[in-house]
Image (spheres, grey):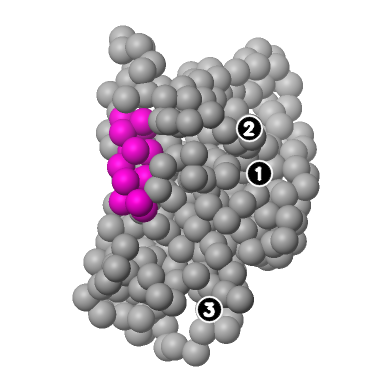
Amino acid sequence: MKNKNYLSIVAAGLCTPVGTDIYSATAAIRSGLDHFRETHFRDTLNQPIIGSLLYDYQVWGPARLIALLNKVIDDSLANIAINKENIVICLLLPEEERLGIFPQWLSIVTDAILPRFHKSSIALCRGKAGIGEALPFLQRILSEQTTHIALLVGCDSYFNAETIRYYTNTNRLLHSENSDGFIPGEGAASVAFTLTSNNNSKEYVTILGFDTQLEAAHILQTKLPLRVKSLSNAIEQACQRSNLLLHDTQFCMSNANGEAFYFKEVALAITRTLKEKVEHYPHYLIAKSVGETGAASSVIMLAILSEWMKHPEGPGNTGLIISSADSGERTAIILQYQEVK
């Protein structure tokens, strides 16, 4: 681990239905609280669909995403005295092919955010899959000393009539005729990274290793059996790059959204990669509190853990994050926090 640099979190911003800042949202999610309510959307039996909505934001379309993004970006930079034009931002947005998401909307959002930041800034419109491309990009940018601070920002919302209708018709959404589905949600999160060495990274929540693999047996296909080979390989590679074994971690947090497919996948992958039995290995779910948050989910997990792992009653000082995309991308991240004495 000598002479190795790591992505370390120095600040974070969070805006969710259970809390509109990093402290209230983290406390609510730690406590298992939610803000699930009946929405004005209806299922096939004309019953209201349950959702996790930010009621204080009365704008819609791209303006809604822009408002959420500005909120979390400003929060994460509140104590960082660097001009925005000297900060690289990697923006994670919904996938372009999702029904209800229009390319012009994503262009409006991108044009409203990126020009204020460093010219190397990028937007990845790949939904949950974006994290697998974002982390190598941020590590490269910081390693090349393009900037000293880089932002990873994610934002998403499933509250669009066409989006709701598509996931209802394909039996992906939780409603009166489908118990194996997810609750639509929305939110945004921003995480500020810097690059630290092994000698000075212990005061931060730090990414020790990460890896992304492509799973052929994903939820959008029905021919291949669920064998979680890619997720298992991603976890093993992330552990190897961290010089740790999975049983050295104390917990797992994932963006599994409520569908049985993803619960089975995570459980099988952890069982396969744990080389030694552990007495207690909890699996924390952000969807339990905020629903399905798509492109924002991986950044929400990083933001929550950047605060929670510092708490005396936190989940542990080393943990695993799992991000799974419908299109098959599987990303595993090993995080560690150790307070300087």
Q: Quadrant of the N terminus?
A: bottom left
Q: CA distance from mark 1 to mark 3?
A: 24 Å
Q: Is residue 209 left or right of residue 9?
A: left
Residue 283's image quarter? top right
The amino acid beneath tag 3 is: Leu
Q: Quadrant of the C terminus?
A: bottom right
Report if residue 236 lies within the magenta region: yes
Q: Earlier in the sequence, mark 1 or mark 3?
A: 3
Magenta segment: 230-243
Measuring 60% from the left and 36% from the top, which residue is drawn there?
281
Q: Is residue 91 left or right of residue 183?
A: left
Measuring 41% from the left and 83% from the top, which residue is drawn there?
84
Q: Which residue is mark 3?
A: 77
Compared to 65, does 127 lie above or below? above
Report if residue 277 lies within the magenta region: no
Q: Earlier in the sequence, mark 3 or mark 2?
A: 3
